[in-house]
Image (spheres, rainbow, N blue to C red):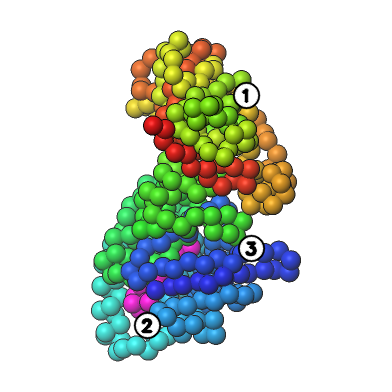
Amino acid sequence: MIETRALTKAYGRRVVVDAVSMTVGPGEFMVVLGPSGCGKSTILRMIAGLEEPTSGEVVIDNRMANNLSARDRGVAMVFQDFALYPHLTARENIAMPLRISHSGSLAEDMRRVEQVAGYFGVADLLERKPAQLSGGQRQRVAVARAIVRDPRAFLLDEPLSQVDAHLRLQLRREIARLARRLRVTTLYVTHDQQEALALADRIVVLESGRVRQIGTPQQISSDPADVFVAGFVGAARTTLVQGAVYVDRRGSSVLDLGEQALDSDRTLPGHHTDRVTVALRTDALRPVPVDAEGPVLRGTVSFVEDLGAEMLVHVATGLVGVPAAYASPDAQRSGGRPVPHQREPLDDLEEPFGELVVRVPAGTRPGVGEAFAVEVDLDRVFLFDRGGVRIRADAGS
């Protein structure tokens, strides 16, 4: 088991990990997910004993670990750059932790090396040096070296980021299968949400050094706690737009989106006239005839992505989008104003704010500039207040 209690790391006045508390249960596979620079790797390095916390505590198997050396913590770490010794063979690289710990005889160590190498399909490559191995083979050797000593916990810092897409899928399956087979507590860091959703028992969503939500992949993707999680996590693309809530005498709500509006039988007590952020995901949108009635948004086709089995239609609706900077904690503390360091200036390649993305079956391709209507599944629409916190509506009678 791994536990962090208000774990904090600051470099001068810059706080990179801000009071992070979480518990990874025995044998659990937990993924820390967040954008680049949010403090994920720093958390891992503090748990491993490679970085000293500014404040807070690391607990491993119910034992305070702050004052333990990295070697005495009994955890193994895999880095994204493989970190193999170039002058040693794969066999010698994998065996290194055993030789350092003097845990057994040479014969016993070699049997263990060959067993672990077999787990990852590199048993026939043990006499090769890293330069003679492909990127995928080097990463397999690095993971084998990490687990050869039966660690209390397995820490992986974006281990697949330098492996091509095909091998990445294969290796992540192997890592997940082996971690569960060995029942070793695993903490895995990534910025890839697909990787997190595929691997994790639970996910910690991190942003600007702070925990935004902890939950199962299903909870994180289908029930986001705040606007950052809604925009960052989920297989479906998400458009964040500005809106306002108006509640009629019957208690039903209208979402005023500026040029367009959505009527709902869901009630939002206490939110009449409130400004909100509305998250519209691709999986909540369905193309309908332009004269359709109901909760429908209308616009024109601006771009079409042909993915073979389906197409993604980008629809310009005139809705006022919310840039990612507004979803950051710093922006919330500044009263909702974007903070310059949170987002690079817009360029011509960036998707326009307020543009919906709709899945349509392969076949008839809508033309750019063509009128397009989208039915909105209001049960899948997420609302957030000015601070970015989720507003939960009640179903009407």
Disc 3 crowd rating (10 Å Cα; few below 14, some 14-19, many 20+) is many
Q: Which residue is mark 3?
A: 16
Real-space CA distance between mark 2 and mark 3, rounded to the nearest whole angstrom: 34 Å
**Picture layout, residue 201 above or below residue 379:** below
Mark before the other along the chain sequence, 1 or 2: 2
Read off the residue under disc 1. 258
The amino acid type, in three-letter code, at marker 3 is Val
Image-based side of 11 in relation to 249, left or right: right
Q: Which mark is residue 98?
A: 2
User: Please, what is the three-letter code of the amino acid marked with disc 1?
Assistant: Gly
Residue 152 part of the magenta-drawn span? yes
In three-dimensional space, the C-alpha distance between marks 1 and 3, rounded to whole angstroms, equals 38 Å
| Residue at (54% x, 81% y) in the render | 66
When the figure is inspected, residue 289 is found, relative to residue 214, above or below; the finding is above
Looking at the rendering, the stretch of residues picked out in magenta corresponds to 147-159
Q: Secondary structure at mark 3?
A: strand
Q: Is residue 64 visible?
A: yes
Quarter occupied by the C terminus: top left
Instruction: Check the image and report above or below for 118 versus 102.
Output: above
Label drawn at residue 309? none
Whole-percent x, y for residue 279 in the image: 52, 36
- Mark in the foreground, 1 or 2: 1
The residue at the point 40 percent across, 50 percent down is 219
Query: Residue shown at 74%/66% (left/top)?
Result: 13
Q: Answer yes or no: do the residues labelled 2 and 3 have beta carbons within 8 Å?
A: no
Magenta stretch: residue 269 in it? Answer: no
Please state which amino acid type lies under the numbered disc 2. Leu
User: Which quarter of the figure has residue 299?
Assistant: top right
Question: Which residue, as the protein is rendered here, is positioned at the far front?
Answer: 249
Quadrant containing the N terminus is: bottom left
Q: Nearer the viewer, mark 1 or mark 3?
A: 1
